[in-house]
Amino acid sequence: MTLKQGTTAAGGPGAKNSPKQAGGRGTRLGPWPVVVLCLLIAAFSLLPLGFVVVATANTGWDSIVALVFRPRVGELLLNTVSLVLITVPLCVVIGVGGAWLIERTALTGHKAWAVLFAAPLAIPAFVNSYAWVSAIPSLGGIFGGVLISVLSYFPLVYIPVAAVLSRLDPALEQSAASLGLGPWKVFFRVVLPQLRLATAGGALLVSLHLLAEYGAFAMITFDTFTTAIYDQFRSTFNGAAANMLASVLVLFCLLLLLAESRARGSARYARVGAGVQASPGRLQLGLYQAPGQLGLLAVTGLALGVPLWHVGRWLIAGGGDIWKRDALVEALLHTLGYGLAGAVLTTVLAFPLAYLVVRHPGPVSKILEAVNYLSSSMPGIVVALALVTITVHNVPAIYQSSMVLVAAYALLFMPRALVNLRAGLAQVPHELDEAAQSLGKPPLLAFLRVTLRLSAPAAAGGAALVFLGIVNELTATLLLAPSGTRTLATQFWSLSSEIDYTGAAPYALLMIVLSAPMTYVLFVQSKKAAGQ
């Protein structure tokens, strides 16, 4: 059924979703309890950014000039900018090229390749670095940083681009071909412009990961802002130098967000004509079948084969004794506990905002959502510094407590839950809530029995992605974990820093095993979004 603008299936012409229909008393902004809760969550999300602003203001102009405009900061800026400018285009080329081969050509085994090309996300970047240092002990510098970054993060571009490619309407390509354009011209003039949104989003994710990564670069002694901030913090404990480096890093993040917004533009690509969209055809590769297979094999071999081979090699070298350490079980239990606690808290905090965005769209809900994304783009080192400063000066009783660490996880990974919940709630018609209320159910009970129940799969998917992030999180955990707390990531880092590569191998394997199912969940969700 097609509805004209200004009508709804439930209410006829001009019908609107009233606050009461949405579940409870409220204003046009939404139910008051939900609005207030979202405002509190937004204030919580702004803590890292507020810390940076206050720390910068308290430092004073003369100190800022002395701490920021010095050769060391110039060196860090050159390393970081070079890393982003080289790594991101390479990830885009590999991600877009791999997605096109897998989704739009008659590539033999394309279903298996689709999973394999997403699989490197299950291997933390610092485990990748550990494997490559095992293979090439002298690896370092910008080359080492780019190599490890590309192999770790290209799936962040591949997954969204593959999802878009699989659902593009082939009518535009067929029209271009009928006008005499060859396959390559069709790709560059018709297909590639339609990938702009997915490519820009993936490139932004890669860039933010590069700015936040600590372990992978510290292991190859490649200095970036994050490694320098951590080292400065460890030596001076929240000194002005670390705070100023954090301010520069946050400014870099904000510039990246602005650049991505400009690159994304305002264009939208949607099919609005009548009829059923045809499935896109697959281009016959012919003589290019073998080069295509070899190219994908080379990328997956470097991104998956090298880390898995060297983790296995160190496991064999260590024998059975490396599995008998009590610290291994303790680290696994701590990781599972923090992962589950962080996933539950993050999903619970994201739910009111997702509800407001879907059921009461408007300027306020958009601003609150944007605040969350902006704050969550802050690197883990900045979030950790903010929470350390706030707790030490204001609530010392909870400094280095489990509560603060789980709060940091919520700040870092809330968008993962929010995106899933928003998509799930959008598929739950509000008319079902209205029907339940018309049968005498109170608004809250109708919400719990209808909306919450139907959005549970989306919430579970979001929680799984948050859990994946927590399992592989290193920087914030190193700074905020309570004394005596060991996670798989921190214990792996401790042993690998001591060059105990055999002892670190079981922790690396367990992180990969825990991350693999969650990575598959992300891959499946991308396919569902594409209607497959």
Image: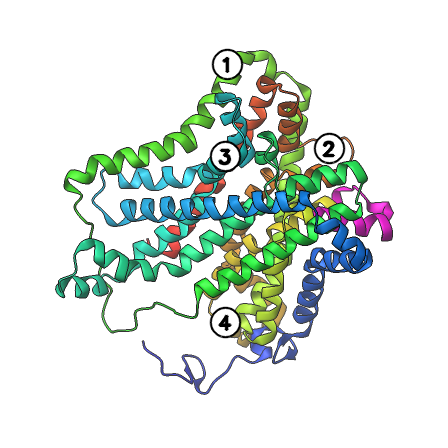
**Residue pointed to by mark 4:** 430
Q: Quadrant of the N terminus?
A: bottom left
First reached walking from the N terminus: tag 2 or tag 1: 1
Q: What element carries label 4?
A: helix
> Which marked residue is nearer to the observer: mark 2 or mark 3?
3
For the residues labelled 2 and 3, the Cα–Cα distance comes to 23 Å
The residue furthest front is 71
> Which marked residue is nearer to the observer: mark 4 or mark 2?
2
**In this picture, residue 112 sits left or right of residue 314:** left
> Which marked residue is nearer to the observer: mark 1 or mark 4?
1
Magenta stretch, overall SS:
helix
First reached walking from the N terminus: tag 1 or tag 3: 3
Which residue type carries mark 1?
Ile
Question: Which numbered tag is attached to residue 485?
Answer: 2
Q: Is mark 3 on a helix, strand or loop?
A: loop
Percent of width and height locating residue 466: 57, 47
First reached walking from the N terminus: tag 1 or tag 4: 1
Q: Are marks 3 and 4 in contact (CB under 8 Å)?
A: no
**Residue 340 lies in the magenta stretch:** no
**Residue pointed to by mark 3:** 123
Q: Is residue 345 visible?
A: no
For the residues labelled 3 and 4, the Cα–Cα distance comes to 40 Å
Question: Which numbered tag is attached to residue 316?
Answer: 1
User: What segment carries the magenta color?
Assistant: 383-403
First reached walking from the N terminus: tag 2 or tag 3: 3
For the residues labelled 1 and 4, the Cα–Cα distance comes to 56 Å
